[in-house]
């Protein structure tokens, strides 16, 4: 090999060439393979010593000009002078399983099996709540009959009691149907949690974190709807219905069966209607609808809400219809607002919560001030029944 391969010349072996199969006297065990092409290039410099390497698996170093040159293999060579075996190529990393496909991995039979499991778990929760409700059946009936008793007292009907037409009415209502209704309300968080477990596998991991807010808000809205129906809508509507024939010599005599059926229809109907925000949020979560779409078609939604309110309203007057429809319309826009918050999170945008809460507090204070002014200058006062603010 000529000195032209040495970039510095002076550090190359002077006047000597390292031919195939030869070794130096100073290093008798250093031998270049016959089929090895050697080219020297400086690769590093350490304490005045330059280390050279070539494109094969050999390198040599020289401290100072004229010093012996050491030629060493960088990797052990195979027996017989054969070049070393090249290293195995790095194994390709196996792609991690896509955790976003979720429910797509489940077959149709697995869907049915999961649905059966969730139904059984939900029924089990209702059964436990039913047993607990049986222990307080008497207190539950007094609570359910309170709106009727209050309405009859306000209308001057004496005694303000309900009637049992059939001997089995008391057993069926107080010991069977009423505990079932109470069990449904008490176990509603558990039922909604099972519904979420069935739907969650088809969602993205980021969206599955909404489990706890979904269960709490759904159960809270359902119970809030029942309380609104019990303390506001049902009481006012019942008093309106029972007082329609008093001035025409009609004495109301209400059967506990008919009263309970009406009570259940109103309680469950309003409770389900109060789930409108949750329904809109879920539809936005699975990308079936968008807030902009709902706002653009809100007039059709309001028409449907009024029709539903007319069905569940216990009376046929416009006032009770508005009493049911107004909260439903407000809940519809609350659902749109929740869906909009979800869309902002998907787009990595933030909602101006500080500005929102500032205006919310301002509006709340204004409402309280108007209430105090009405109570002081116009003789209004608060009461425990609807309309809560009366003279």
Image (tube, rainbow, N blue to C red):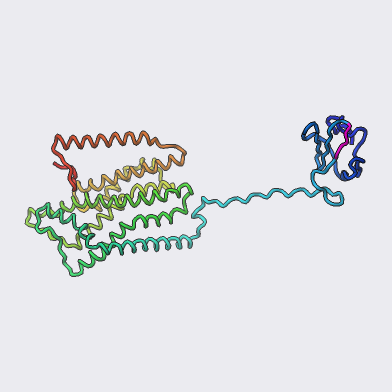
Residue 226: percent from left, percent from top: 27, 52
Residue 372: percent from left, percent from top: 19, 36
Left or right of 175, for residue 217:
right
Which is more toward the observer, 231 or 262?
Answer: 231
Give, as a single range, the part of the protein colored magenta.
66-70
Residue 93: in magenta span: no
Residue 67: in magenta span: yes
Residue 159: percent from left, percent from top: 10, 59
Left or right of 275, for residue 90:
right
- The residue under the point 26% across, 44% down is 326
Q: Is residue 259 above or below residue 329?
A: below
Q: Residue furthest bottom?
A: 167
- The residue under the point 27% across, 47% down is 306
Whether residue 45 is visible to the viewer of this picture, yes or no, is no
Quarter of the picture containing the N terminus is: top right
Main SS, magenta region, reads: loop
- The residue under the point 12% across, 58% down is 160
Quarter of the picture containing the C terminus is: top left
Whether residue 361 is visible to the viewer of this picture, yes or no, is yes
Residue 232: percent from left, percent from top: 21, 49
Res 17 → quadrant: top right
Q: Is residue 13 above or below residue 311?
A: above
Q: Residue furthest front?
A: 47
Which is more toward the observer, 259 or 223?
Answer: 223
* Total numbered labels: 0
Which is more toward the observer, 70 or 34?
Answer: 70
């Amino acid at each position: 090999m000529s000195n032209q391969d040495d970039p510095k010349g002076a550090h190359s072996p002077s006047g000597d060439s390292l031919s195939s199969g030869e070794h130096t006297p100073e290093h008798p065990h250093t031998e270049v393979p016959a089929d090895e092409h050697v080219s020297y290039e400086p690769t590093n410099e350490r304490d005045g010593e330059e280390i050279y390497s070539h494109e094969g698996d050999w390198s040599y170093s020289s401290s100072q000009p004229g010093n012996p040159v050491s030629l060493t293999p960088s990797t052990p060579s195979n027996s017989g002078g054969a070049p070393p075996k090249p290293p195995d190529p790095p194994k390709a990393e196996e792609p991690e399983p896509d955790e976003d496909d979720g429910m797509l991995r489940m077959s149709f039979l697995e869907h049915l099996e999961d649905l059966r499991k969730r139904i059984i778990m939900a029924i089990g929760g209702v059964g436990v709540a039913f047993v607990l409700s049986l222990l307080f059946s008497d207190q539950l009936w007094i609570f359910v009959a309170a709106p009727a008793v209050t309405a009859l007292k306000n209308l001057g009907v004496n005694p303000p009691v309900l009637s049992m037409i059939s001997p089995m009415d008391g057993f069926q209502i107080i010991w069977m149907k009423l505990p079932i209704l109470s069990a449904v309300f008490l176990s509603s968080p558990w039922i909604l949690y099972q519904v979420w477990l069935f739907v969650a596998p088809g969602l993205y991991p980021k969206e599955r974190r909404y489990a706890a807010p979904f269960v709490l808000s759904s159960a809270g809205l359902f119970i809030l709807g029942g309380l609104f129906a019990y303390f506001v809508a049902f009481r006012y509507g019942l008093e309106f219905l029972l007082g329609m024939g008093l001035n025409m010599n009609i004495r109301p005599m209400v059967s506990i069966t008919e009263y309970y059926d009406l009570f259940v229809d109103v309680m469950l109907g309003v409770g389900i209607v109060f789930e409108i925000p949750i329904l809109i949020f879920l539809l936005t979560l699975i990308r079936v609808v968008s807030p902009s779409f709902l706002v653009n078609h809100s007039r059709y939604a309001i028409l449907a809400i009024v029709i539903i309110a007319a069905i569940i309203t216990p009376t046929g007057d416009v006032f009770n219809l508005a009493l049911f429809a107004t909260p439903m319309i407000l809940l519809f826009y609350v659902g749109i607002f929740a869906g909009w918050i979800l869309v902002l999170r998907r787009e990595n945008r933030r909602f101006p919560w500080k500005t929102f809460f500032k205006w919310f507090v301002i509006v709340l204070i204004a409402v309280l001030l108007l209430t105090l002014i009405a109570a002081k200058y116009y003789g209004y006062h608060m009461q425990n029944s609807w309309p809560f603010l009366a003279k």
